[in-house]
Image (spheres, grey):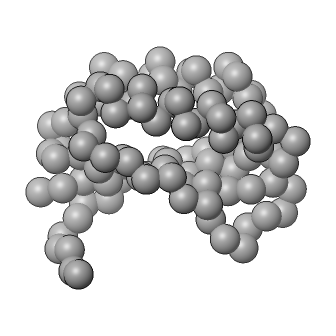
Amino acid sequence: MMYIYNVTIHIEGHVESDWLLWIKSHIPEVLATNKFNKATLSRVIGHEEGGVTYAIQYWAQSKDDLESYYKDYAPQLQKDGEAKFGSAMIGFRTELQVLEEFE
């Protein structure tokens, strides 16, 4: 069963361009853990008050891969962004279980 690790980030406008450059190098670091097989970066439309909101979705093949990522990689990778952007970046994370895909 597939799982999606969704990271939603609100970034203040004055650091948005720096954050975009950083996240585009950060996503490959997360994928390099080999716990996810793909990722998408999306802009959330309609929530631009005081900044911009983005969603990054990482696709994992199993719950075990996701749990391993949380244990072995997530703490340091999350600290990297917090150290660079501090309070100009506010985020929350959700986990989704894919029940079925339609095309």
The residue depicted at 36 percent of the width and 22 percent of the height is 73
Q: Position of residue 79 (x, y in %)?
A: 56, 21
Q: Which corner quadrant holds the N terminus?
A: bottom left
Residue 5 point in image, percent of width and height: 36, 48
* Whether residue 51 is visible: yes
- Describe residue 36's horizontal placement relative to residue 8 as left or right: left
**Horizontal and vertical percent position of residue 45:** 66, 71
Q: Residue 60: x, y in percent?
A: 24, 46
View extreme (bottom): residue: 103
Q: Which residue is painted at 31% across and 46% down in the image?
A: 38
Q: Is residue 99 left or right of residue 70?
A: left
21 in relation to 55, above or below: above
Q: Is residue 5 above or below residue 85?
A: below
47 relative to 64 in the view: left or right: right
In this orientation, does residue 70 appear? no
- Front-lying residue, 59 or 83: 59
Q: Is residue 91 above or below residue 49?
A: above
* x 65%, y 26%: residue: 82
Left or right relative to 22: residue 67: left
